[in-house]
């Protein structure tokens, strides 16, 4: 079994729940925000673009 060390754990910025898999919409459209110097992904119409540090779970994006 392969052990992943130092793997980033993402938590929902809304409720704090651990996000075990990135939402599919995040993998579809990712952009680099030059003003913030960080990647952002589109989380759907309700949430829009958010940085990886501000990810929200599906429940908080409804």
Image: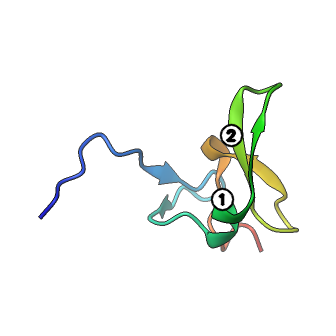
Percent x, y of residue 11: 52, 53
The disc at residue 39 is: 2
Report the side of 61 relative to 21 (left or right).
right
Q: Residue visible at 75% across and 59% down? A: 29
Task: Identify the image quadrant of residue 3.
Answer: bottom left
Q: Residue visible at 61% across and 68% down? A: 23
Q: Are marks 2 and 1 in contact (CB under 8 Å)?
A: no
Q: Nearer the viewer, residue 12 or 23?
A: 23
Percent x, y of residue 44: 81, 68
Discs 2/1, front: 2
Q: Quadrant of the C terminus?
A: bottom right
Q: Quadrant of the N terminus?
A: bottom left
Q: Secondary structure at mark 2?
A: strand
Task: Identify the image quadrant of residue 15.
Answer: bottom right
Q: In this figure, which residue is indicated by the disc labeled 1?
A: 56
Give the answer, above or below, for where 15 lies relative to 13: below
Give the answer, above or below, for where 3 lies relative to 37: below
């Amino acid at each position: 079994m392969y052990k992943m060390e130092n793997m980033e754990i993402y938590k929902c910025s809304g409720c704090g729940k651990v996000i075990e898999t990135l939402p599919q919409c995040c993998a579809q459209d990712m952009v680099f925000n030059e003003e913030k110097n960080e990647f952002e992904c589109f989380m759907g119409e309700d949430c829009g673009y958010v940085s990886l540090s501000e990810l929200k779970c599906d429940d908080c994006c409804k």
